[in-house]
Image (cartoon, rainbow, N blue to C red):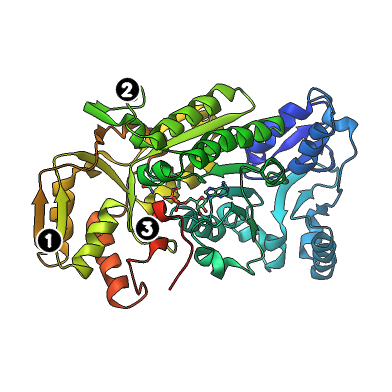
Amino acid sequence: MKHALPLIERHTSIKETIQKIERTPFATGFLINEQGVYLGGIFLSDLRRLLISGVNAEAEVGAYPVKYTYRLEEPSLRDRARVDALLADLRLHGVNYVPVVTSIGEIQDILSADDLTSARPSELPAGQREREKRVLVVGGAGYLGSILTRKLLARGYQVRILDSFIYGRKSVEELTGNERCEIVEGDLRNIHTCVSALEGVNAVILLAAIVGDPASKVRPTETIETNVLAAQALASAAKLQHISRFVYASTCSVYGVGADLLDEQSSLNPVSLYARTKIASEDIILKMGDAYFAPTILRMGTLYGYSPRMRFDLVVNTMSMKSFTDKKIQVYGGKQWRPLLHVEDAADVYIRCVEADLKNVGNQVFNVGSNEQNYQIEEIAERVSTTLGGIPIQRDDTSLDARDYRVSFAKVHDTLGFSPQATVEQAAETIFGRLSDGTIRNPAQRIYYNHYFDATEE
Ligand SMILES: NC(=O)c1ccc[n+]([C@@H]2O[C@H](COP(=O)([O-])OP(=O)(O)OC[C@H]3O[C@@H](n4cnc5c(N)ncnc54)[C@H](O)[C@@H]3O)[C@@H](O)[C@H]2O)c1
């Protein structure tokens, strides 16, 4: 079990220490001397603070004072009074992990406060031990973000959401009061907000953007500021603090139009400002990558499915909604190819990236979706129609959307073992259900369409 623990020999450089801790699920390193005797714990956040204060990243980590020296000898585990006293101390000082040491001080195991709370800590499977990592989700109140933050919390992460709430904050209202979730209202374009959001963070997920071709057309300046310049600022600030795990939300729209099955090496052919800004930021962020800053670019297919921040400007969602309100589905063109991805499946891929070995996902681009869900628009309409009991489809040969691309998702499947769990049919049923039962009262409200930039609910 020891190999999985962040045991740090005291002569290790700060830079290497950060890298070693980041390879584990912990946010703390456990310092040992040459004989393997435990010296004390060091938080990743403190190491990053040292770097910000100007300390040389090559300096030996053992030269700086350790934050805590809590430990438990194996026999004391059975002494409930002693364990409870230690737990009280841990909580007071915000410490979550304690090494269990032998009589000569060698680390045998590391237990979390949660492990110690239960009567038989050693029986807890490692997977159930609380994760200590804090993840920053910028854009965490959005269509994808509001699903992803809930999933991260359910897996035991601490989550900080930074969002300017362009489309309101209702999607994260029920997370208020969750002690592992911090909700920060702020604009990523503000440099101070951007840098402060990284305090104490071990992984960054950047979703915030002006999203979609119509929205970026309405607010081109804000699109460039947010999608490119703010993204660049956040990545630079993360790199300076050695926060190497940086997952960036891009889109298959970067392929624009393409006749073949397009993979990550295929040439890009953007047909909108939105896609061009995504390509620009991909490029900037990837060029920053090195052994200590290892960004992952996720080019997702068009998302679909129900979310606490609902969008009805996405193809499956629109068709499901129109089946309810208009009792018909309108198809423009219809022959264009569009890869689809359920929003819940998309969120799972981000979690895989946060948990994967950085060697496999760092400095990499992945198309995210599945080969089976590359559909032509007319097929999507047929699937929605059939699922909802044969809704009539009206066809109009004029295509309003120039995008037409079929994408290969072999890499995300092979590297991360990702296969989608959800289907267009399930999503159509759910959305239709939410409209029928009144969960969504008026799908025509502007809040459900990105290009209105409206947070008002009737
Ligand atoms: N929805 C899709 O089909 C799709 C497909 C591929 C890629 N993506 C990408 O996924 C990400 C999330 O998309 P979504 O559908 O959830 O969009 P969304 O518009 O629902 O969410 C974006 C969130 O970012 C926030 N935001 C925008 N500008 C901000 C700023 N300056 N500071 C702080 N917060 C800000 C908004 O308030 C919103 O909550 C985007 O980067 C998008 O490009 C989405």
Q: Which of marks 3 and 1 is in front?
A: 3
Q: Is mark 2 on a helix, strand or loop?
A: loop
Q: For this rendering, which residue is in front, 434 or 292? A: 434
Q: Mark 1 or mark 2, which has the lower sequence index?
A: 2
Q: Can residue 158 be seen in this view?
A: yes
Residue assigned mark 2: 266
Percent coordinates x, y for residue 364 in the rendering: 47, 28
Rendered residue at 32%/71% (across/down): 434
Q: For this rendering, which residue is in front, 328 or 27? A: 328
Percent coordinates x, y for residue 199 in the rendering: 73, 45
Q: Is residue 36 left or right of residue 137?
A: right
The residue type indicated by label 3 comes to: Arg
Percent coordinates x, y for residue 339 in the rendering: 27, 41
Res. 180 mark: none
Q: In which quarter of the image is the C terminus?
A: bottom left
Residue assigned mark 3: 311
Q: For this rendering, which residue is in front, 274 or 35? A: 274
Badge 3 vs badge 1, beta-carbon distance below 8 Å: no
Q: What's the CA distance linking mark 2 and mark 3?
A: 30 Å
Res. 386 mark: 1
Q: What's the CA distance linking mark 1 and mark 2?
A: 35 Å
Crowd band around label 1 with a 10 angstrom C-alpha radius: few (<14), some (14–19), many (20+): few
Label 3 residue near ligand 1, CB within 8 Å: yes
Work out which residue is located at the far bottom of the displayed protein and give it.
437
Rendered residue at 80%/34% (across/down): 52
Crowd band around label 3 with a 10 angstrom C-alpha radius: few (<14), some (14–19), many (20+): many
Q: Mark 2 or mark 3, which has the lower sequence index?
A: 2
Q: Can residue 289 be seen in this view?
A: no
Q: Is residue 275 left or right of residue 374?
A: right
Q: Nearer the viewer, mark 2 or mark 3?
A: 3
The residue type indicated by label 1 comes to: Thr
Badge 2 vs badge 3, beta-carbon distance below 8 Å: no
